[in-house]
Structure formats: structure tokens, C-alpha cells
Image (cartoon, rainbow, N blue to C red):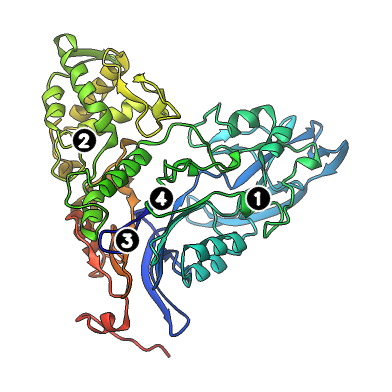
Amino acid sequence: MAEPVAGGTSMLLANPHFPWQGKNRMWQSQLTIPGKVNVSGASLLGFPAVNIGYNENVAWSHTVATVAPFGLFDVQVDPLNPTTYLVDGAWEQMTSQRVEVDVRQPDGSLAKVGRTLWATRYGPVTTAIQGQDLPWVVSAHAVRDVNMHNLRALNTWFRLDQADDVHEVVDILETTQGVPFFNTVASDRTGKALYADIQAVPNITDEHARSCLTLTGQLLFNQTLRLPNVPPVSILDGKRSACDWPDDPDAVAPGLLSPKVQPRLIRNDFVGNANDSPWLANPEQPLAFPRVMGDTAAPRSLRTQELILTARKRIDGTDGLPGKGFTPQTMGQLLFADNSRAADLALDATVTMCRNVPLGLVLVDGNLVNVSEACPVLAGWKSHDYTTDSRGSWLFANYWAYLLGGQGIEKLPWRVPFDPKNPVHTPNSLDTGSSALRNALARAVHALRTAGIALNAPLSDVQKVTRGGEQIPIHGSLGQLGVLNVITPGQVDGKFDIIFGSSFIQQVRFTADGPPQALSVMAYSQSADPNSPHYADQTTLFSAGGWVTDRFTEEQIAASPALQIKVLD
């Protein structure tokens, strides 16, 4: 999120969400080539440039976009010879590649296991997508990915590391199209805030989609049919060569959508993105774009609502904090307030429903559950937050998960449905008479009791990450609860732990002169080595709501009492 600053020119909050386990994490660094580049931030392991960070004049971050960076082609095959397929009335032969790998056997030995991979002119054949079967019978599905040959990402980020203002950021994104499936937010020393979804995108204009989508493709692409964990994928008619992604003269590579039609917005107040489409980067100026980039006039996630409301209230000074506009103090305070938009919308109605359950008993899944104990627990959770000392928050999180059941927020029993003219405040007002609410609460109460967790247990008792045998309480919660500081628990080696969420969090403030002022915290810590002093230090700091003050200039770095200099041969 990028926005104006009290006593400064602009400020950026970077809060990307990444795995907390394994190697696919962000790692912090500062890269300096005297007279060429000086950039601080974090990158994925092995990437030789900073992916998210700041330099002397620009700060930027990324979020995962709603673009599906790949598409499918439905090709008709010969049932008697399924490796031949029809294009423009003529049969073509698929190409094949034999791949063999060593696989360890039960007795410990290695043996070769082979597969034959088949490909069409559009790309390789696949028989499933995100767990959904794609039978290879009368037709086959070939997949084409815009990033299969995208070697431009290093050019994009190396140039971002040297950008001078948000206008140059736009130029970099357009001329490289190296960003793979990410939005970009940025702010600069002049006080401008940028949102841009300019990246490598399949060249599926709305006209091309109307002409070439199959019937199933129309349902998926327009999200009329929502499949679990499946983005708005295109399925194009592979029998017609004209349905392949066309080349655009403004794009940097064949089959890419022109960067000129991809959304961007530069403002003086704020822009942001919480993994929704570009539509409401700022609700005062809704964006339009090709459908392949995402949806418009559709329900926003509760986290998007929370981001917009938080920014508006802080800019107006109506959030109860001192002054107007963001400072490093208010920015960090609001992020780590861990407020739940879901609780704001639904807690009171849930308490009313709970109190009205006859005798407090609900029969669900063959269990007669007494929910009466849950009513005062939820009613007492007046803060609506997921701080470590909150009580009732874990019960509500479980209740909300059962109530959603994997559905979109708009599917819940609201009295006021979604209104595209009021997308930040709708839907709202849960129907307290709905059996869905009673059943969800009963399931949550039963689940906690079965697990031996008190209904009023503080969050610190249940939401922890293990580091070197120590269990560190972690604040924050799931994105579907409308909490900005996303934390996702799960199973690690059969034990409950944190698997995903806020990673490298950074706030950068620019003033009219002087170096950028930055605070950061690596939520899961910098080192993956249990013997390192940096294996859990920032995790403990994150748990306490603390920040590290960055040292950016040579003078600031030289003044560090912990400075060590190693000269490499």
C-alpha cells in the first residue's frame, strides 16, 4: 500500500505473504555498486536483485495478481490415435519427449522411472488442473504459459532497483513485461503513489475471448462456475489456429497482451492491493481492464475492504489515532492491530444468534452441541482483533471457516447483498435466523472442545511457530477474516505450526530531502539454520510487534556497533 505521510512526502507498506517453512522464502539484503545501484529489501533465494525494497527515491512491493498467467487449448483428438489432433481441418501429430528420473525404492536402491510427455503446437498436454481432472478421450487439453520463456524478470527487477520515480517504474514494467503474475505498488520522493498490474499476460482480449472460448471456458473465464483453487482460466478452441494467443506489436514477446491496456493508477492519496483484481486500487477511481486481468463490479475480499477503510480513516484522521496521514508509528500500529473486518461485520449478529438458540442446543453432524458457553466469550471479544492476548478470536476464526465452507463471501446469508455501487460496505448484516450460522457455531464449538481448547483461550495458546524447540506466539490471522496481517496455521511434520503469511514486512518513508527512513521485520527471521543467532530473533520481535530500524546510507551502516566487514577474494 502506498499513501501520503504526515510530515513527509509519501510512504509505502510492503507486506507480501510467503511460506514460513522451507527455502521458498524472502531473504533480506542491501546491494550496492558505487555510483550504479544502492538498494535495500528482500528477494527470493538465489535471485541476484532485490524484488521488494527501496532505493534513494522509490519504494515498491508486489502482491499476487488475479491474472491466470496460463491458458488451456481444447484440441480434438482421434480416438483411435489420441496423439493426433485436429487444427483447421487437418490432423497434426503431437511431439513426444521421454523423461526418466532416478526414484528411490522401498529397499533403498535407485531405479529409473520414465514418462512420455506429449505436446501440441500450443504447448504440453495436461490431464489435470489444480486437482480437477481433464480427461484425454475425445479431446485433450494443452497448456500455454506466458512465463515458460520469460527470462526478462532479472531485467525488470534490476531496473526497478535503480528507478527514480513512479513514472519510471511504469516505463520499466511496460518495456520489460518481466513481472510474472504480480501487482506492483510503489511510492516516490515526489509524493506520488502508484498501483500497476503490468506484467506478462496472455493476449486474450475481450473480443478474442468471445470468439474463441469453449463453453466450459466461458464458465471458468467469467467465473460463473467457480472451482476450488482454480483461477479464471481460459479454455480456447484449439481446432482453430486463429484462437491461439495473437501477437501484439506493443508487447515485448509473442502472445503477450499489450502493456498499454494493462491497468495503472497514480494518485496523491493512496493506492493498494490485497490480492484482489485491480478494480478498486483506489475506490475513488475504479479501473477498467480486459477480463483476463481480473473482474470488476464484483465482491471484494474482506481484506481489501479492511485495507481501503484503514487507509481512508487514517487519511481523514477518524480512526482514533492522533493526527491525519501515516507516520511510521501509525503505520505499524494499524498493521499490527490485527483487526478483523469479518468480526466488524458479523460478530454482533453472531452473538445475537447464539443467545437465541433454544436451550443453547444445536444438533449438527450427529452431535448435540451446547453453544451457550460461546455466547459470552464472543460478546466479550469487543476488540475484534487477532493480537496474541485476544480471547474469543480463535473461536470466531473456527466459526467463520465453517460458515464460509470455501465459498465466496457473497454466498453467506446476508440481509444486504453485494452492491457494486457500494463495494466497500456490502454485503452486510447477517441473517441471525439462518440455520447456517447456528450450525457453523456448533461445529466450531465441537471442534475446539474435541481438541481440548478452551472457547476463551487466548490466541497465544494456540497460534504459535516452533523455532529451535521454542514455541513463539504469533499474532494475525487468515485473510478471509479480513485481517491485514495474514497468518495461516497448518501442519508441519504432523504438528500444528505456522506455514504461511506475512513475511518481509517493510515500511519506507520519504521526506523532501535526506535518506529514506525504513523499518522492517522478517517475520520468520533471516536464517534457516537452527544454530544461527538469526534463526528466531526477528520472529520474537515480530511476535512482540517490534521493528528493525534500517541502516541505508554508508554513514548509517558504518555507525552500527554490530558491523562486520568481510572482503572476498
Label 4 and label 2: CA atoms lie apart by 31 Å
Instruction: Determine which residue is flagged by label 3.
Output: 506
- Looking at numbered disc 2 in the image, what kind of residue is underneath it? Trp
> CA gap, disc 1 to disc 4?
24 Å
> Quarter of the image holding residue 37?
bottom left
Residue pictured at 57% horizontal, 54% vertical: 199
Q: Quadrant of the C terminus?
A: bottom left
Q: Amino acid at mark 1?
A: Leu
Query: Which of the marked residues, 3 or 1, is nearer the chain's N terminus?
Result: 1
Q: Which residue corresponds to mark 4?
A: 271
Residue type marked 4: Val
Residue at x 32%, y 17% (from the top left corner): 436
- How far apart are labels 1 and 2 at the CA level? 44 Å
Residue annotated with mark 1: 257
Q: Quick one: label 2, few (<14), some, or many (20+) residues within 10 Å?
A: many
Considering only order in the chain, which callout, 2 or 4, is on the residue closer to the N terminus? 4
Mark nearer the N terminus (1 vs 4): 1
- Of the residues tagged 4 and 2, which is closer to the observer? 4
Depth check, front residue: 537 or 291? 291
The part of the image, by quadrant, that contains residue 343 is: top left
Kindly identify which residue carries mark 2: 394
